[in-house]
Structure formats: structure tokens, C-alpha cells
């Protein structure tokens, strides 16, 4: 590169160097703030630029729009631009056919499923995102305005092709108990002819999308899917609930372009009751079904994907198939899974499934995979599907799986199953409390602690406790033949906290894990405790 000093005076050089910063700041300065509130006006009556009601007369008034569709119409261009903020006030906003401002373009009486909002315009950068936010109260707590789907609308929040976006403080749902294409007619949504009813298919739909933050969202009761998303790069979700969606919670299989990359981060999530319908007026769950009847039921599942997946401080429970299914990671050196402080229980298949480089630590896993037995439309092949293993770990060449400081119980075939891999693969199984139960459908036999299913990987056991498992399995370096003395070891009331004089206390070697399931420091005492929970007088 030539020396700039030879061509420009000092003042010009300074201007040249500051130009990128100036452009970035000008983009932020030009960003506008818009408002939606139930007493606002339409796009002729109001500019959307003030958080004020429509006065009842005049046009182009400084007042809020009355519906998000005026910002993101189904026809024409969005009225907000990249980097803008749209605040949505408290109240309920119908999304779909018949909603204010939704007609025209792809939305017509013969295509009511197309009456969804326009894609959110991409922001300018990671520090100048386009923001779609519910209002907060004086304490900064989310008020959670409700966006509810109707007339078979295909999606509610549209992030297809949207990057550098923040969406937060919203409730996303519908007003119907039905499940799309359910095997039982009484539970099935009407789809043969309009009117279809007050149901929506998908809560959030995304593809070809990077650098998105979703936070403080309650996505529940949709007829099909909570979040349908693939082709993502660097997404983060914080305090997002994905519950009671009729087919699946998070569906990462969008067909071509499903693979993700970068960091996919999920913190403080709840993913539950997917594969069940939700009674919209009471919030109760019903019509639970799974794959044997034509449904699905995973809490989270993907197609073949890359990326570094981080799921932390999350509750994954009562999904009608697997809880977290990351079996389809591509196994590339840059792909990995980190599951930390996850509470997974009562999912009807496997609780947690991974492939490739993986770490599972400080988690409580209760494989009560027969929980749905006798409930709704679940059938025998749905209970403990894929043998109901609590953890299913698949390895390839040169992969490393670290399974450490977990408390695991279950009634499937095994508590931990590892498969695949060769002499370059390694599974470090360290400081786990492994507590067997009677195997579901096993005629009184116990679950196994660990089983290598056709795997040539190297297994390193250290500091584990095995109790009540098949064939009294006891790898070297383990504590065996002693009850773990936890607060409750039944699956229905499982409580992982050790009691006084538990053999897990101060019995684990240090493996560099510095806190526990509750985020308390580890160790407390002369050595770490086995399992997910570190005993402390501060509890």
C-alpha cells in the first residue's frame, strides 16, 4: 500500500481515516423510532413516529400506528428501514387475514396463509440492529404485547433474509386449541376451506439470517412450529420459551440451505410440551402425539448443520420425542455442542443427543421417557423411542466428548450410549452420578450405565458413581455399590441435591469445572462433589 502521507495533507488524511466511523455514526443517527398501540391510526392517519393515540381526525398526524402490519405490510415496501426501532404497546394484535393493514399483495381471500408480516428489514451492523420490541414498564420489565395468528397464517414474525435484527418482549401465539394436520379429527385444524379459524402455523420463521438476537419471547400454542429456522449465522436467544406447539418446538430443517454456522447460543430457555396442542384459554396441554401417528415432537431438532451450539441454564421437558436432538451436526472440526446446566426430563425419546465434539456438564438429566404412557394420542412405539437413552453421544474421527459433573437417571435402555468413532476419538466420562431405574418394557431389568454401541473410541472413566445399573457395571476409578443418598431418586420427584453423608461429597477429582448446576462455586470443601450439585452450607 502506498504511503498516504505522500499524497494527502495531514487534515485530509485524518478525514479519510475517520470516514468509516462517521458513516457508521450517521447511520445510527438517521435511524428512526416508530410506535404501535391499540388506539393508534392507520398509515394515512398517523406517521407512527409518536407514542400517542390517534386524535380521530386528520392525516399524517404525529401518532402511533394501530397495528404492526402498517410497519411491515404484506404488500409494498416496509415503512421502517434498516436500523429503525418499532415499539409495540400493550394489547393484542391479530396477525393474518382480516387484520388491519394486512390486505393486498400476496394476502388475499384465497391465500389467507400468506397474510403474514413482511420480513424485518436488515439492520446496518451488529451495533445498529433493526429492533422489534414490546414495550416495557417503568421498571424495565417486559409488558409482552400479544401477536396472535389467525386464518391459517403461515408465520407471525418473519426473519427470512433478515440480518442484524433484535426481537424481544413479545408473546407469539394463536387463539385455537387445534394442531395442524393432526391424526385425530377432533384435534385437527380446519384447512380444507375458509374460514379456517383463529390458528397460526409458525411463530418465528427465519432463513439466510445472521447476527440476530431474540430475547424475552413467549412462543406457544402454535398449530405447527414454534421457531422454524435454518441457514443461520451467529444467532443468540435469551429467555425465550418455546412451549406447546403442535408439531415441534425448534425445527431446523427448512430444506435446502438448512445448515448453520458461527455461534448459535441459547440461554435461560424453556422448550417444553412440543408435540402437544395447547388450550388457548387455559394454557393446558392436550392432543399430544408423536411419530408413530404421523407427528414429530422434538423440542429442538435440525437437519445436517454446522455451527458451535451453546445451550445453557435451560429447561427441556415433556416434549413428545427427543428433548434436544443435535445428532445431525456435520462433524466438522469447527462444529461443536456445549450443554451446560441443562435440566432435561420427561421427554418421550432421548433427553439429549449430540454428534461430534461435545461437552455436557453440570446438567440434571431424568430420562422418564414413558411419562406420556396412556396420555392423549401417544401410542406404544412413541414411549422411550430410540431405546429412550438419557444421553446419546455420536463420535467421528478425532472427536472428543466431555461428559462431566452430571446427575443422570432414566428408564431407557442406558443412561449414556456412545456410538461411532475410532482410535482417534475419545469420550471423557468424569464425575457423573449415574443412577439406574427399572427399564421401561424391560421385564424388570435395570438400565445400563454406559454402553459403547459399535464404537472403537477411547473411553476414559474417572470419578463417577454407578448405582442400581445393569450387571453392576463399575468402570475403574468409580464409586459403586453405594446409594448416592440424594434428596429423591424416584423419577417422578427426582431431586439431585445430596443428603448429609452422601458418598458423592468431596469424592471427585478436579477436572476444571468451577461451578455447579445452580452456579454455586465448585469445589466447596477439600474436593469437588460427584454429580451436578456441589453441597454447600450456603444452600
Image (tube, rainbow, N blue to C red):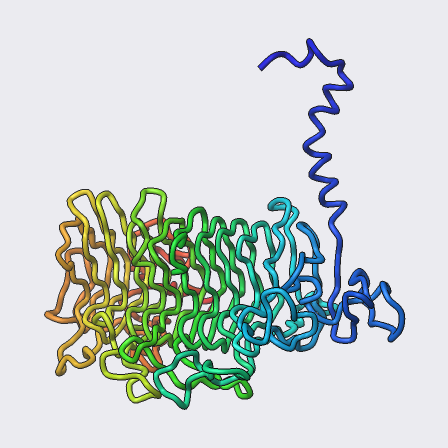
Looking at the image, the residue that sits furthest to the left is: 471
472, 409: nearer the viewer: 409
Q: Is residue 348 visible?
A: yes
On the image, the x and y values in percent for residue 212 come to: 55, 53
Is residue 379 shown left or right of residue 475? Answer: right
Decide which of 12, 433 is in the foreground and name it: 12
The x, y position of residue 337, in whole percent, is 36, 53
Does 506 appear above or below 200? above
From the viewer's perspective, tell me whether residue 280 is left or right of residue 132: left
Image coords of residue 68 (percent x, y): 68, 67
- Quarter of the N terminus within the rendering: top right
- Choose top left, top right, bottom left or bottom right for residue 43: bottom right
Q: Residue at x 43, y 81 (%)?
A: 179
Residue 286 found in image quarter:
bottom left
Picture mark count:
0
In the displayed structure, would residue 184 be above or below residue 209?
below
Residue drawn 34% across the image and 77% down it: 494
**236 on left or right of 257:** right
| Residue shown at 16% from the left, 46% from the top | 422
Residue at the far top in the pictured view: 6
| Residue 367: x %, y % from top left | 29, 73
Regarding residue 499, the answer to whether it shows in the image is: no
Amino acid at each position: 500500500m502506498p504511503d498516504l502521507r505522500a499524497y494527502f495533507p495531514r487534515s485530509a488524511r485524518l478525514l479519510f481515516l475517520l470516514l468509516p466511523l462517521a458513516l457508521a455514526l450517521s447511520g445510527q443517527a438517521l435511524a428512526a423510532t416508530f410506535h404501535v398501540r391499540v388506539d393508534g391510526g392507520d398509515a394515512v392517519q398517523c406517521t407512527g413516529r409518536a407514542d400517542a393515540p390517534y386524535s380521530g381526525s386528520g392525516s399524517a398526524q404525529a401518532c402511533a400506528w394501530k397495528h404492526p402490519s402498517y410497519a411491515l405490510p404484506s404488500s409494498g415496501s416496509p415503512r421502517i428501514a434498516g436500523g429503525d426501532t418499532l415499539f409495540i404497546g400493550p394489547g393484542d394484535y391479530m396477525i393474518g387475514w382480516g387484520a388491519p393493514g394486512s390486505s393486498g399483495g400476496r394476502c388475499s381471500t384465497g391465500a389467507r396463509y400468506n397474510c403474514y408480516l413482511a420480513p424485518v428489514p436488515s439492520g446496518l451492523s451488529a451495533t445498529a440492529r433493526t429492533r422489534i420490541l414490546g414495550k416495557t414498564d417503568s421498571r424495565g420489565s417486559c409488558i409482552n404485547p400479544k401477536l396472535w395468528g389467525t386464518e391459517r397464517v403461515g408465520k407471525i414474525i418473519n426473519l427470512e433474509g433478515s440480518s442484524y435484527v433484535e426481537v424481544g418482549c413479545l408473546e407469539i401465539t394463536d387463539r385455537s386449541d387445534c394442531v395442524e394436520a393432526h391424526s385425530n379429527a377432533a384435534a385437527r385444524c380446519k384447512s380444507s376451506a375458509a374460514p379456517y379459524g383463529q390458528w397460526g402455523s409458525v411463530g418465528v420463521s427465519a432463513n439466510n439470517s445472521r447476527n440476530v438476537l431474540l430475547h424475552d419471547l413467549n412462543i406457544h400454542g402454535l398449530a405447527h412450529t414454534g421457531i422454524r429456522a435454518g441457514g443461520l449465522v451467529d444467532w443468540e436467544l435469551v429467555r425465550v420459551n418455546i412451549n406447546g406447539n403442535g408439531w415441534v418446538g425448534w425445527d431446523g430443517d427448512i430444506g435446502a440451505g438448512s445448515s448453520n454456522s458461527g455461534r448459535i447460543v441459547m440461554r435461560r430457555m424453556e422448550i417444553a410440551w412440543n408435540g402437544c396442542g395447547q388450550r388457548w384459554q387455559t394454557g393446558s396441554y392436550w392432543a399430544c402425539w408423536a411419530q408413530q401417528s404421523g407427528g414429530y415432537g422434538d423440542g429442538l431438532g435440525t437437519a445436517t448443520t454446522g455451527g458451535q451450539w451453546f445451550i445453557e441454564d435451560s429447561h427441556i421437558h415433556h416434549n413428545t420425542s427427543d428433548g434436544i436432538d443435535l445428532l445431525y451436526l456435520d462433524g466438522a472440526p469447527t462444529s461443536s455442542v456445549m450443554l451446560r446446566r441443562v435440566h432435561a426430563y420427561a421427554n418421550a425419546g432421548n433427553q439429549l443427543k449430540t454428534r461430534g465434539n461435545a461437552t455436557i456438564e453440570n446438567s440434571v438429566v431424568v430420562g422418564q421417557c414413558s411419562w406420556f404412557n396412556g396420555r392423549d394420542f401417544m401410542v406404544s412405539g412413541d414411549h422411550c423411542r430410540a431405546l429412550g437413552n438419557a444421553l446419546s453421544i455420536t463420535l467421528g474421527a478425532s472427536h472428543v466428548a466431555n461428559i462431566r459433573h452430571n446427575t443422570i437417571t432414566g428408564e431407557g435402555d442406558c443412561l449414556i450410549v456412545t456410538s461411532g468413532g475410532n482410535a482417534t476419538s475419545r469420550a471423557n466420562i468424569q464425575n457423573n452420578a449415574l443412577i439406574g431405574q427399572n427399564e421401561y418394557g424391560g421385564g424388570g431389568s435395570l438400565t445400563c450405565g454406559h454402553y459403547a454401541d459399535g464404537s472403537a473410541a477411547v473411553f476414559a472413566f474417572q470419578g463417577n458413581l454407578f448405582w442400581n445399573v445393569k450387571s453392576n457395571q463399575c468402570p475403574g476409578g468409580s464409586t459403586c455399590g453405594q446409594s448416592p443418598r440424594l434428596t429423591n431418586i424416584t423419577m417422578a420427584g427426582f431431586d439431585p441435591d445430596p443428603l448429609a453423608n452422601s458418598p458423592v461429597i468431596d469424592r471427585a477429582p478436579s477436572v476444571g469445572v468451577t461451578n455447579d448446576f445452580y452456579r454455586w462455586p465448585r469445589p466447596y470443601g477439600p474436593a469437588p462433589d460427584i454429580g451436578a450439585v456441589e453441597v454447600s452450607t450456603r444452600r
